[in-house]
Image: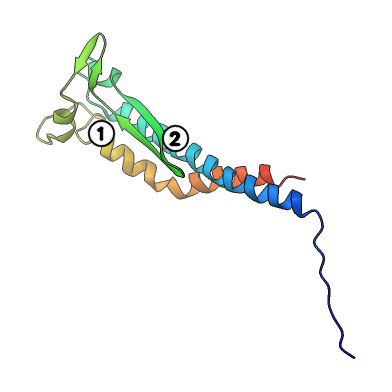
Amino acid sequence: MARSVTIRFTGTTRLTKSMIGSADGVYSGAAKATRSLANQAFRTSQVLVPVETGALKASGRVVAHRVGAYTYRASVVYGGASYPRFVDYALYVHEILENKHAPPTTAKFVEIAYHQARVAAGQTIKMYVSGSLRREFAA
């Protein structure tokens, strides 16, 4: 006589909704983490950006947007056209290593800030995504 084992799942509609919600939560968490990392890099770059008139520092900003169905991009940007001043020298200040700047300011201020934020990237992404998943699967 053969014995059978039966496993029955109940509440599959709720589970399916939670799984779909969790996928959305992962993407939402990743978007929030991307923005958070960019903001962290921006705060660091504000300390490092050379200041002569203050126009370059004032032109700094974070630009974040969705570039694909599940792809998010955030950038730290300095310079460009900004009323009432037009700062078109950000690239030169960033790239010319021979220029002397009063510490803690320095050339490569965005690149240095990026590398410092990148160290925390894994933990930051994990924190935001796991938080989104916990909310989706909460009883």
Q: What residue is at 38 percent from the left and 41 percent from the top?
A: 117
Looking at the image, which is closer to me, 92 or 9? 9
Residue 7 sits above or below residue 97 on the image? below
Please identify the residue farthest to the bottom as the structure is shown: 1
- Give me the residue at 49% from left, 48% from top: 123
Q: Residue furthest left?
A: 98
Location of the N terminus (image quadrant): bottom right
Q: Is residue 117 above or below residue 88?
A: below
Q: Amino acid at mark 1?
A: Phe
Mark 1, secondary structure of its residue: helix
Q: Which residue is mark 2?
A: 35
Q: Is residue 41 left or right of residue 16?
A: left
Q: Judge from the rendering whether residue 43 lies leftward or rightward of residue 14; answer left or right.
A: left
Q: Which residue is located at x 36 percent, y 29 percent?
A: 63
Crowd around label 2: few <14 · some 14–19 · many ≥20 (10 Å): many
- Coordinates of residue 15 in the picture (x, y in percent): 73, 52
